[in-house]
Image (cartoon, helix red, strand yellow):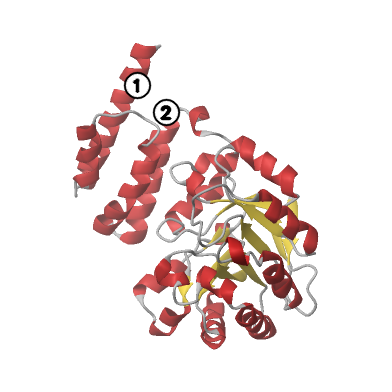
Amino acid sequence: MSWQIGSSLPGSHRAIEVMGDLILAPMDGYSNLPFRSLCREFGSAISYSEFINAIDVPGGHNFVNEKLVFWPVERPVAFQLFDNDPQRLLEAALKLQEYQPDFFDINLGCSDRSVSGRGAGAGLLRTPHLIAEIFQKLTAALDVPLTAKIRLGWDDASRNYLEVAHIIEDNGGALIAVHGRTRQQGYAGVADWDAITDVCRSVRIPVIGNGDVRCVADIERLKQYTGCQAVMIGRAAQGNPWIFARLDRHQVPLDQVHQTMLVHLERMLAFHGEWRGLQLFRKHASCYLNPYTLPKELRQQIMTTSSVDEFKLGLEHIFQVIVEGQSKNS
C-alpha cells in the first residue's frame, strides 16, 4: 500500500510518498542507522532518526552528527527534534535541512523526566500555545513537511490530545503519530486505542497509531479498530525486526536469527567502530536472545567480552546450545 505525507498542504512542499503501513518508532539508543536500515529491509516504511536536542545542534557534536547519517535506501527519512523553545527549534531545523531529510518531526511524546521535566517532549502538551508557535514558525520557514509524535496528555486529568491534534493540523502539520498513553503512564497500563480513533476521526491529515502492538495480529487489530493510516512499533521491534515483515518471533528460523544478529553486529561495528559498536550491540543482543532459556554464564560470557571474535564464537556456541535443547525436547 502507498500513501502520502503533505499531499493536503498548501504551498510548495513536496508530498512524500510512503510505501507500507508499518514504521519503526524513533527510540533513543535504538533507532540508529544500523538498526533502522535492518528494519527498513524487513519492511519499515519510514526511517525516523533518534531524537535530537535542538540545543545541541549548533555545536556540531559527534553524537548529533551520528544521528544525521542515513542511507539513501532508507528514504523517506525524518529527523526528530525536541526542545521547548520555538526559536531554537526553528534554527535547528533550518540548519539540519542542509542534510536533506524528507521531513521533520517534533517530539511531543517523550516521557523521560530529563526531557518532559523541562517542558520538552510530552512536557509541551502542557503548553499548547507553544506547540502552535512551533508549528507556525517551522511550517512557514521549512522546505519540507513538519509532523509530530504525541501522547494523550500530561496525565488523566489533562488529556488534551484532540486540542493538540487540531493545533498541529491548523498550523500546517502534515501527520500525527499518536501513542495511546499519557506522560504520567509512561509505558505502564493499557494504550487507549479509543483515543487514537478519536484523533483519526477528528483530523484530515494522516494519523499513525502507536501503543500495545506486540505481535502481528495486533497490527491489523489496531488498524481496523482505529482507522489509522499506519502503525508505529517501538519496543516490540527490539530484537524482532521481522515484525515489519509481518512475522512473529516464533515464526523466524533459528539460523535466520543468528545470521541477522551477525549482520546487525557488523553494521554496528562499521558505524560506531569496533569497541563502541560491540558495547552498544550488547543491549540488542540481549533482546534477540530474550526468547530463549539459556544458562546465565553463557549470557554473561558474550555480554562482558570486549573481543569481537570472542563475541561471535560465544554467540555461535549459544545457538548450538539452543539447537541441542530443541532437539532434546522434540
Instruction: Please name the residue shown 34% across and 43% down the image.
Output: 285
Of marks 2 and 1, which one's residue comes earlier in the chain?
A: 2
Q: Is residue 121 left or right of residue 317?
A: right
Type of the residue with mark 2: Leu
Against 200, is 266 above or below? Answer: above
Where residue 59 sits, quadrant-wise, is bottom left
Front-lying residue, 167 or 25: 167
- Under circle 1, the secondary element is helix
Query: Is residue 43 in view?
Result: yes
Is disc 1 surrounded by few (<14), some (14 to 19) or many (20+) residues within 10 Å?
some
Residue 105, x across and y down, in percent = 59, 69
Against 62, is 28 above or below? Answer: above
Mark carried by residue 323 = 1
Instruction: Please name the residue shown 60% across and 64% down the image.
Output: 157
- Under circle 2, the secondary element is helix
Is disc 2 surrounded by few (<14), some (14 to 19) or many (20+) residues within 10 Å?
some
Residue 263, x across and y down, in percent = 40, 44
Mark carried by residue 121 = none
Against 68, is 11 above or below? Answer: below
Q: Is residue 233 left or right of residue 303?
A: right
Residue assigned mark 2: 254
Residue 74, x across and y down, in percent = 56, 58
